[in-house]
Every structure is written in structure tokens, then in C-alpha cells.
Image (cartoon, rainbow, N blue to C red):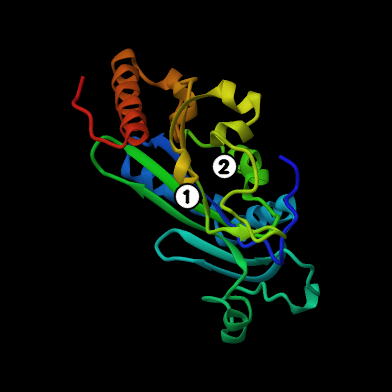
Amino acid sequence: MHKLKLHGFNNLTKSLSFCVYDICYAKTKADRDSYIAYIDEQYNATRLTEILSETCSIIGANILNIARQDYDPQGASVTILISEEPIDPKLVDNTENPGPLPDSVVAHLDKSHICVHTYPESHPDGGICTFRADIEVSTCGVISPLKALNYLIHELESDIVTMDYRVRGFTRDVNGVKHYIDHEISSIQNYVTEEIQSQYHMIDVNIFKENLFHTKMMLKEFDLNEYLFNTTAAELNEAEKKEITRLLKKEIQEIYYGRNLPDL
């Protein structure tokens, strides 16, 4: 689509929301505690800040403010205010604090943001552990969150990904005509590389008239060793491998379809 000649600023808001899951089997309580500790370290506030900062670079956004926090007993959150216009790096607050300074909030209410929250969890029954990360990239102007789509999918290496993309509001061209979207899209899959598409089962639910697009993805390949923590398939007997495989696949399918399934 050719570039629109706009009257003033591009007021369209483009929001890309991710919900990504990593699933694992940990046999003992000690193993489950170790898995949670491992995930909590792998995706702490500092690492998440690096991922989101790279996301800003990919989409061409400038960082205004970073607020990050690690939680006890586990989990982390990072929020970054971003701007389409350049900013003096010396003015950016990227220290660990509970949120933007009051004057930053007032000065940048009309700007965009990127945020992430993590949710590691386990349950004593069955040995299944999950790690979920929620990411939202919300932009206005000409910068687009879709540019970071493949980077985020690749960087988080997830078993299941659910994505929502929404274009809200409108912007006016030089003739005063309102435009409710400024780019072509029929599915989030339009922006996913063929390599990534080949690795996942993908389902769409799109409401085109509302500029609302939803895609969910589930890995095609299942290698039991990739889902075991502190053990390998070679250390399990056949009955154990069969039962653990059943539990893992059931968990994956339940998360993917968003409903509890009966035992097979």
C-alpha cells in the first residue's frame, strides 16, 4: 500500500499482544523448584529489558523510560515508554524502579509502550511445570510492532504462542478523509517467516471489519527430551515415557485450545 499523505500526526494505535508458553516435566518437588529457579533466572528483569530494548531497535522506536522489577518468589515485569522521535540517551531512566517518574508520565501520556510480565508455575500433581510470558508492543505513528514479530517468537523459543493484533482509532489524510488502517493485512501470518510457519501448527480467528487479528501457534515436533528437566528419556522406562508423554501432550493441547480436555 502506498504511503498516505497525512494531515498532522498518524493517530492510529497498533497493538501486538503475545502470550507465550514453555512446558516442562519435572519429576520431584526439588526438580520443580529448580525449574522455576532456572526460568526465573533466564527471564529476569535484566534479560527481559535486553529483549525489549532490542525490540525497540527493530521497530525503530526510541526509549524514553524503563521500569523493571523482579518479584519474590518468582516472576518479573518490564515496561518501556517509547517515542517515534529521537531522544537524548542521557535523559533516559533505565534504573530498576517501580515505574516511570511522575513527570515522565505527564510528559509522555501520548506515547507508546512495550511491556512484559512473566508467570512461572508448577503443580505437585503430575510434575508438569509451565512458564508464561505476556508481552505487549503498542505503537503509534509510522513505527509498527509487526516488525519485531519474528524476533520475539525466535527469542522466546516457545511451545505455544497466541498473538493478538489490533489497529485502533483513525488518522486523517490531507483531504480530511479518515483512515482506520494504513497497511495491508489479512492475518498475522502475513508477517511470520516461512521458516517459523513450517515449525508450527497455526490457527486464525480474524475480524476484518474491526481490524482485529488473532493467531495461535503450537509446535509440530515433539521430542520428549526437550520437555524433561534434570533427566533424559534414556533414564525412563517405557511406561514412564508413555505416561509423561501423555501428560505433556495433554497440557500442550489444553493450553492451545483454551479448554480442559478429558483424559484419553
- The count of marks equals 2
Amino acid type, residue under disc 2 in the picture: Leu
The quadrant where residue 6 appears = bottom right
Q: Is residue 239 left or right of residue 39?
A: left
Viewer-side residue, 128 vs 217: 217
Q: Residue at x 64, y 74 (%)?
A: 95
The residue sitting at 43% across, 21% down in the picture is 233
The residue lying furthest to the top in this view is 238
Q: CA distance from mark 1 to mark 2?
A: 9 Å
Which of the marked residues, 1 or 2, is nearer the chain's N terminus? 1
Measuring from the top left, give residue 219's x and y in whole percent. 48, 26
Question: What secondary structure is found at the residue carrying circle 2?
Answer: helix
| Residue 162 seen | no
Residue at image mark 1: 133
Q: Secondary structure at mark 1?
A: strand
The answer to whether residue 203 is seen in the rendering is yes
User: Which residue sits at x=76%, y=67%?
Assistant: 85
Q: Residue furthest bottom?
A: 103
- For the residue marked with disc 1, what is the amino acid? Ala
Residue 156 marker: 2
Vertical position of residue 166 compared to residue 66: above or below: above
- Structural crowding at the residue carrying mark 2, measured as other residues with C-alpha within 10 Å and reported as few (<14), some (14–19) or many (≥20): some
Q: Quadrant of the C terminus?
A: top left
Q: Are marks 1 and 2 in contact (CB under 8 Å)?
A: yes
The reply, left or right, for residue 125 in relation to residue 152 is: left
